[in-house]
Amino acid sequence: MSDLLGRLRERGWRLTAQRRVVAEVLDGDHIHLTADEVHARAAERLPEISRATVYNTLRELVHRGEVVEVSTDGRAKRYDPNARSPHHHLLCARCGLIRDVHPTGDPLSDLPPSQSFGFTVSEVEVTYRGFCPDCAI
C-alpha cells in the first residue's frame, strides 16, 4: 500500500476536502492513474471537484515528492503514489496496464564502468514491456 494519505497527514499538509479525495483516489497498490482518471474517480466522491483542482493537487504532490509522474511511450502521464519504495514498472504494450515490480539486485551496479561515460548515475528507471494476461490471449 502506498500510504499516501498517512504520509501527507504526517507532513502536516493541509487536507482540504478536495486534496483528501485526490489522495484517497491515489492511495493503494499498483495505482497508476492519469489525471483524467483521478478526476473522474474523485468526482464520484466529491462531485464539485474541478479538473483544475485535481491537476493542481497532482502537480503539488509531484513537487513534494509524494507522487511520481510515470511517462511511457507517449501515453498520458500517470501518477504513482508509491514514491517511497524503490521499484520498476511492468507495462502492457497493448492496453497500457502498469504494475509495480521489485526485482532483486541493484540496477546501478549492472552498468559497467566502461559504459557510464564518466556519468555519476544517481537514479535508474526500468520499464519491462510485454503483454498482460488479458492482452496475451
Image (cartoon, rainbow, N blue to C red):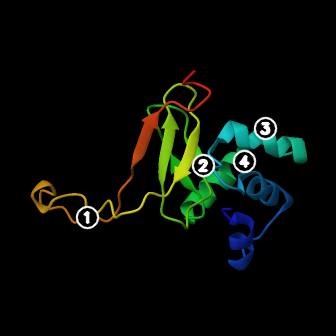
Q: Is residue 41 visible?
A: yes
- In this rendering, position of residue 21 left or right of residue 123: right
The three-letter code of the residue at mark 4 reads Val
Residue 83 pos. (x, y %): 55, 62
The three-letter code of the residue at mark 1 reads Ser
Image marks 3 and 2: residues in contact by CB distance under 8 Å: no
Single out the residue that lies furthest toward the top.
Answer: 137
- Nearest to the eye among marks 2 and 1: give it: 1
Q: Mark 1 points at which residue?
A: 109
Q: Name the residue under label 4.
A: 54
Residue 78 pos. (x, y %): 58, 43
Q: Mark 2 points at which residue?
A: 79
Q: Tell me which residue sits at (53%, 66%) in the image.
A: 85
- In this rendering, position of residue 98 left or right of residue 115: right
Q: How crowded is mark 2: few (under 14 residues within 10 Å), some or many (20 or more)?
A: many
Q: Which mark is residue 40?
A: 3
- Nearest to the eye among marks 2 and 4: give it: 2
The mark that comes first in sequence, 3 or 2, is 3
Q: What element carries label 3?
A: helix
Image marks 2 and 1: residues in contact by CB distance under 8 Å: no
Q: Tell me which residue sits at (76%, 51%) in the image.
A: 25
Q: Is mark 2 on a helix, strand or loop?
A: strand
Residue 68 pos. (x, y %): 54, 55
Q: Hey, which quadrant is residue 81 in on the image?
A: bottom right
C-alpha gap between disc 2 and disc 4: 12 Å
Instruction: From this view, report whether residue 15 is shown above or below residue 54.
Output: below
Instruction: From this view, report whether residue 12 is shown above or below residue 58.
Output: below
